[in-house]
Image (cartoon, grey):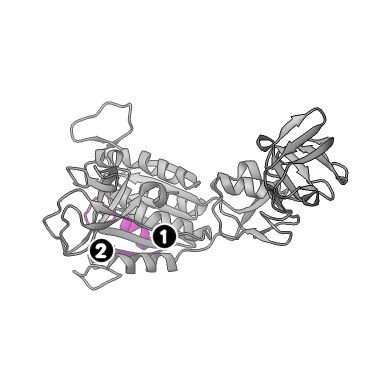
Amino acid sequence: MTCGCDAAAPKGSLIPYEDALQQLLERALFIEESESLPVVEALGRVLAEDIRSEIDVPPLANSAMDGYAIRIADVQPGGETRLRVTQRIPAGEVGEAVETGTAARIFTGAPIPPNADAVIMQEQVCVEGDEIVFSAEVAPGQNIREAGEDIRAGQVILGNGTRLRAQELGLAASVGRDRVTVCRRPRVGIFFTGDELVEPGQPLAPGQIYDSNRYTLHGLLQSLGCEIIDLGIVGDTLGQTLEALQKASQRADLVITSGGVSVGEEDHVRAALEQLGELDMWRIRIKPGKPLAFGFVGDTAFLGLPGNPVSVFATFCLFVAPFLKQMTGANDVVAEPLQVRAAFDWPRPDSRREFARARLRRDEEGQLVAEVYSNQSSGVLMSTSWADGLVEIPEDSVVKPGDIINYYAFRDLIA
């Protein structure tokens, strides 16, 4: 018999946000499988190896400017220097040694020829036939990029657990890597319960609503590079719910549902989970998104999100995204906030920590400030589209314009 008790805390108590997140991350099962991918296909993936350079970058000292490679010993201090140009060195070619009284025409990226120890910019010289004339002072090493200035052979340039952005792909390529070993994509099974749900494009009968949560979750999971196993809308029967949960858990690393985990007679996800595995019902001291269900079916984790559209979005940002990152071994699991000034008034304190939909703008002085959407109801999905992040309002707190608050950008939460 299902009781209405909260398995993670005494009945009636609420779990602080940090405690709930810590408990969740501690129970994330690491995906040990990895795969080798071409670097060009690895954007957004998490490295499952350290990448160590086998070469110096740059491999040779090279010119940082278009100009002339010269010997400092040939420069006349405080006077005019005249040198004969005896060679031309474009990028990709190696020149000959610079002899006494001569210079080499050189271009950006070209290797510095033997004996040369400085490059003078072309703008600082006058060209007279096959000679250059200049009076500028030149220092040893001027406009020369030394071998290994960027990367030394043997150096670890990217560590295990790094999420690969465009710049990391370029960095791997710069040391000659054409493939990288990355964690396998998380496989996430999703299904949705409710006879009131209708797919977009179909007519609505009285009492029915379009299923927006499915599309929100699809986009969020895609942004994290997950492989999605979508079982669609499941009817409000225990039998269909059991079948969907078994099917999803056999193929996925994580199963996510929205709604259906309360104690109502038509909420069958909770009953199905308790038959097939283990389930904790958490009531978290946050708003929106107080209810959260967590459990396992075999080795497959389960997260039951609230049913309200904004609550689905918020709990994914705050709990599901870090959980998935932890499963892949990513280094930066929890997003760091940006401290900004409030451009709004929040006069009514709440016993729960609130995460309000917000966006940043510049005030009259050019400072970043956060403003919040006018309607913070958990059913107002428009607020998530209007916003570009969440502002954090601590428990039992009010906020006045000018107060310093924490702001979490969506791009940091779900990337």
Q: Quadrant of the N terminus?
A: bottom left
Label located before the other in sequence (2 or 1): 2
Q: Residue furthest bottom?
A: 10
Q: Residue furthest front?
A: 79
Query: Magenta stretch: residue 152 in it?
Result: no
Query: In terms of depth relative to the viewer, which is nearer, 329 or 13?
Result: 329
Residue 146: % across, % down: 72, 53
Please give the residue where the numbered disc 1 appears in the rendered image. Answer: 334
Q: Are marks 2 and 1 in contact (CB under 8 Å)?
A: no
Can residue 272 be found in the magenta stretch?
yes
**In the rendered image, the vertical position of residue 321 relative to residue 83, given as above or below:** below
Which percent across, then down, holds residue 83? Answer: 81, 39
Label 2 or label 1, whichever lies nearer to me, is: 1
Q: On the picture, is 186 further left or further right than 60?
A: left
Q: Which residue is mark 2?
A: 283
Gap in angstroms between the C-alphas marked 2 and 1: 21 Å
Q: Amino acid at mark 1?
A: Val
Q: Residues within 10 Å of mark 2 (few under 14, many from 20)?
A: many
Query: Who's the residue at 22% across and 41% down the image?
Result: 380
Q: Is residue 271 visible?
A: yes
Q: Residues within 10 Å of mark 1 (few under 14, many from 20)?
A: some
Q: Secondary structure at mark 2?
A: strand
Region of the chain picked out in magenta, as a range:
259-281
In the drawing, does residue 322 fall left or right of residue 136?
A: left
Q: Is residue 245 left or right of residue 1?
A: right
Which residue corresponds to the image point at 58% horizontal and 52% vertical from the top-left?
184
Q: Residue at x 29, y 47 (%)?
A: 367
